[in-house]
Image: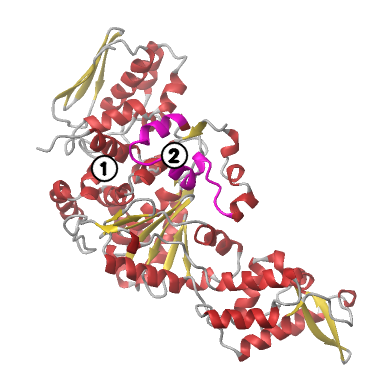
């Protein structure tokens, strides 16, 4: 058997805790979590929900819409930075110093100073995400939840449903697309940027998942507040990781395991999704999306036989309170409702004439993938003033988002291992058996077993390392609690793990956050607290299929278990 190296141990233990930083440093973890969710019985149980009755008779897009509503109803977006506790920049930089340098982390992670492009400076990204409550050294863990941890949020105060942050939701979507909608994994690409995670589904013109929602190509360009929110990451951020069944690519690493043909297809299809021809409806959507540029435009409209002119931002103000729209056949009704004092006889200096731009668009089918077409539009409408020129540049960007993707040509190709060969027609038991058999030969499959948390399938050491080093919530919450009181609190908790089935265990902070756990999990939480209080004391947990006994100089505690773990002893020698 191959000996576990310190690097292997760090990677395997990271598959247990799955923090934002760990996934960035070990990009294979993103797909490993997807595989762990595929192994979990939770999403497979959704098939029995009446909501999905006859779903196999629906067309693929209708299935996905059905899934979206289920996720909207059963999961909330949650970015409570206190859920998983605090760490420090120094500690995390020291931990990862052998894997990636501090400058790379600072370029990619908001916890280490990342601000993104101009957009993120403008919205003050640290305040936007609540990071301003922490100083430069003390930072929160950003952890990705398994489907079990997502479901368990319903046990927390203030939650009525499951919950998760953006990575958790994107991985949940990917797993459910495969299990419930029977979308092949080859058509699902997972994308991570420094501040977001989403999926691109290669179906029809493409679909993006965005937290709990879905975005089609039509929606991407519809100019609504929801589409504006969905556009932020790809408009403003570098894509750091793309993960696929064939492998992954990471912007900072020299090696890539994703198959070139799959990545080329992804890049082509995503770029097609992010590009549209400019027509009058898209022009209107751009102006609704980018309100700051409305003042750069004016409209010409006849009143009593004479052309009058009005600022377009005022016209859109009226549109908000009217069933009529500027960009369709109901325009005359809208213009008739505008007060006459909004108009003036002379054209407004420096403002683009909306009517002329509309006519230009009708006469010229502009393709913004062609530099000549972009130049044609600039020459005609950007010369009046600086604001007009900026507005035209932003119109071009609205119609043609150019994603910043990792360059595969600059990478060295590395084999990811045998093909996963997971098919939507497979049953869960067959899928679990396939991944277990692949694990010795496939890095993502091997790490998926650690993320799956079944200690009857993997060595204990990575799970225990994660438990003792990266569970600050339970330590903080119990710091002033006498041991006798802590034991009583643990005894009073329901003896139910959030992880279904034999051998699968929660980490201490999951037990504390959701106030429930199997006896083995409770024993480990108590050992974690004892270890922190008395580092010099030796501890051991003797585990049998039906119990866990914690022995320490401070006392002995017994907990009942239903996890059916094979007999073992966990020991922590005194310092």
Q: Residue furthest front?
A: 410
Q: Is residue 135 left or right of residue 186?
A: right
- Display colour scheme: secondary structure
| Near-viewer residue (405 or 97) | 97
Secondary structure beneath dot 2 equals helix
Quadrant of the rendering where the N terminus is positioned = top left
Main SS of the magenta part reads helix
Q: Residue at x 14, y 34 (%)?
A: 3
Whole-angstrom CA distance, mark 2 to mark 1, is 30 Å
Q: Residue at x 50, y 33 (%)?
A: 139
Of the numbered discs in the image, which one, if any, rests on residue 420?
none
| Near-viewer residue (508 or 230) | 230
- Give the labeled residue for mark 2: 102
Give coordinates of residue 191: x percent, y percent: 40, 57
Give coordinates of residue 37: x percent, y percent: 30, 49
Quadrant of the rendering where the C terminus is positioned = top left
Q: Is residue 70 visible?
A: yes
Q: Is residue 469 left or right of residue 571?
A: right
- Give the labeled residue for mark 1: 452
Vertical placement of 552 versus 54: above or below?
above
């Amino acid at each position: 058997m191959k000996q576990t190296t310190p690097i292997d141990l760090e990677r395997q233990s990271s598959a247990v805790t799955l923090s934002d930083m760990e996934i960035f440093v070990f990009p294979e973890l993103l797909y490993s979590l997807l595989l762990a969710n595929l192994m979990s019985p939770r999403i497979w149980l959704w098939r029995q929900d009446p909501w999905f009755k006859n779903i196999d008779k629906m067309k693929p897009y209708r299935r996905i819409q059905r899934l979206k509503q289920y996720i909207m109803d059963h999961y909330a977006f949650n970015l409570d930075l206190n859920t998983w506790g605090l760490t420090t920049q120094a500690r995390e930089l020291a931990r990862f110093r052998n894997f990636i340098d501090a400058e790379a982390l600072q370029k990619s992670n908001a916890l280490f100073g990342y601000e993104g492009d101009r957009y993120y400076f403008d919205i003050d990204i640290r305040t936007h995400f609540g990071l301003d409550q922490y100083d430069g050294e003390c930072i929160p863990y950003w952890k990705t939840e398994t489907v079990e941890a997502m479901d368990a949020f319903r046990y927390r105060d203030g939650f009525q449903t499951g919950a998760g942050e953006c990575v958790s939701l994107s991985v949940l979507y990917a797993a459910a697309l495969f299990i419930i909608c029977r979308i092949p994994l080859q058509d699902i690409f997972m994308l991570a940027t420094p501040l977001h995670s989403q999926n691109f589904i290669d179906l029809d013109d493409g679909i993006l998942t965005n937290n709990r929602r879905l975005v089609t190509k039509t929606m991407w360009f519809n100019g609504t507040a929801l589409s504006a929110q969905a556009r932020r990451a790809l408009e403003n951020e570098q894509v750091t990781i793309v993960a696929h069944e064939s492998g992954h690519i990471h912007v900072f690493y020299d090696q890539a395991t994703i198959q070139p043909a799959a990545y080329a297809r992804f890049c082509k299809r995503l770029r097609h999704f992010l590009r549209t021809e400019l027509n009058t409806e898209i022009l209107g959507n751009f102006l609704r999306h980018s309100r700051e540029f409305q003042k750069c435009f004016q409209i010409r409209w006849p009143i009593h036989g004479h052309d009058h002119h009005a600022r377009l931002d005022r016209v859109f103000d009226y549109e908000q309170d009217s069933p009529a729209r500027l960009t369709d056949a109901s325009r005359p009704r809208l213009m008739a409702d505008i007060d006459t004092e909004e108009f003036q006889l002379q054209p407004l200096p420096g403002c683009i004439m909306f009517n002329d731009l509309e006519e230009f668009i009708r006469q010229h089918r502009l393709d913004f993938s062609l530099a000549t077409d972009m130049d044609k539009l600039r020459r005609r409408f950007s010369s009046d003033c600086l604001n007009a020129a900026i507005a035209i540049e932003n119109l071009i960007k609205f119609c043609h988002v150019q994603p910043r993707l990792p360059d595969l040509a600059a990478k060295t190709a590395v084999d990811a291992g045998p093909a996963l060969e997971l098919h939507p027609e497979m049953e869960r038991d067959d899928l679990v058996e396939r991944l277990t058999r692949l694990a010795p030969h496939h890095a993502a499959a091997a790490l998926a077993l650690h993320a799956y948390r079944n200690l009857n399938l993997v060595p204990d050491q990575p799970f225990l390392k994660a438990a003792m080093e990266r569970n600050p919530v339970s330590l903080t919450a119990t710091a002033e609690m006498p041991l006798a009181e802590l034991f009583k609190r643990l005894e009073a908790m329901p003896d139910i793990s959030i992880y279904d089935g034999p051998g699968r265990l929660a980490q201490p902070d999951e037990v504390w956050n959701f106030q429930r756990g199997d006896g083995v999990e409770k024993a480990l939480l108590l050992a974690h607290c004892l270890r922190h209080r008395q580092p010099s004391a030796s501890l051991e947990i003797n585990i049998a299929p039906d119990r866990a006994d914690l022995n320490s100089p401070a006392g002995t505690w017994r907990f009942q278990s239903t996890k059916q773990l094979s007999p073992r002893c966990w020991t922590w020698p005194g310092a």
